Image: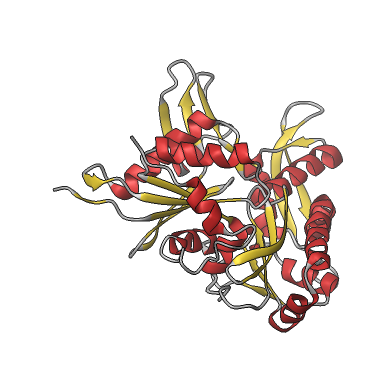
Amino acid sequence: MLHLGADIGIDLGTANIYVYVKGKGIVLKEPSVVAIDKSSGKVIAVGSKARRMLGRTPGNIVAIRPLRDGVIADYDVTEKMLRYFIGRVNGNKVLFKPRVMVCIPSGVTGVEERAVREATIQAGARQSFVIEEPLAAALGAGLDISQPGGTMVVDIGGGTTDVAVLSLGGIVASRAVRVGGDKFDEAIVKYIRKEFNLAIGERTGEEIKVEIANACPEDKPIVEMQVRGRNLLDGLPKEITVNSWQIYHAISENLSLIVNTVKEVLEETPPELASDIIDKGIVLTGGGALLQDIDTLIARETGLNVIIAEDPLSCVAIGTGRALSMLHVLNPQQKRSPLRKAVKANHYAG
């Protein structure tokens, strides 16, 4: 039986894709990974199945991440991935294709933005809209951004960190830095390679980050972890022990970039809105908000209260879905209004 296509919101993240369906909430969470047969171009697996193949595939199969630093690095693979996820969520027996809202980092170029919109249309959307990540994060966190008061959001994703001050349904000041969970993983992999002559994969780097990384390790017990990899000196498997202080030194440069970006946006914020932020504090969203004590670090460096959203991983996806029914709230007169961007991004298929 045919049915109407539901509105869909997609958090098209570098590390993970979250899909929100109107009336159902988040219905799908999958890694942004696609496994492809190089000879035929055929998709072998998508999502968690493909992620398990990272670094473990035979020569004719490659497992890749088609998004890097929050933007599309491989257009064709991204379109196939979107088509797969939209099909899974919406089914094939639909009377009308869905309207789809996709979030993008606040610092993307016009070319990068257009690539997201076109990939969404090619993947089966009836209409394609885009919304900037910090705005979607605020909506998903349940913040009221329609009033003339300042709200500050720091969304630390897999590929980018978006920092923005919001008011009257739009973005007043913002910056995006291409640092996120993936950069932490890469920094850990490089550190262990340099300090221990041990080669590890990105999945192991992520496991170390989740288990023992701490953004503010002072006065905290040192935590250790066993790590296995390949010895670069003799090529044999080897096990070493790393601790939380060593991992802090590995990621400290990226932490500094995030903190400095927050400070830069605060410096650009009008005094009246800065006063509101003193009262409300800073809201952290995204997977990076789960890095141990990152809220403590930002609070110490800015002197402001920092709150981690209730479900930081899902905030952007929820806000992206909600935005389709809230376009009337998002001020079209704002210079960087999401409605202005969304209407400009609107496409009709076929």
Relative to 213, does residue 68 appear above or below in the rendering?
above
Q: Which residue sits at x=33%, y=65%?
A: 23
Across and down, in percent, residue 102 comes to 49, 50
Point out the residue furthest to the front here. Answer: 333
Q: Which residue sits at x=43%, y=33%?
A: 80
The colour scheme used to paint the residues is: secondary structure
Name the residue nearer the viewer: 277 or 238: 277
Residue 130 appears in the figure: no
Name the residue nearer the viewer: 226 or 334: 334
**Quarter occupied by residue 115:** top right
Relative side of 17 to 28, left or right: right
Looking at the rendered image, the quarter that the C terminus falls into is top left
Across and down, in percent, residue 32 comes to 52, 43
Residue 40 appears in the figure: yes
Across and down, in percent, residue 126 comes to 35, 44
Point out the residue furthest to the left here. Answer: 1
Point out the residue furthest to the bottom here. Answer: 279
Relative to 67, does residue 129 appear above or below in the rendering?
below
Across and down, in percent, residue 128 comes to 44, 46
Q: Which residue sits at x=52%, y=74%?
A: 142
Relative side of 283 to 252, left or right: left
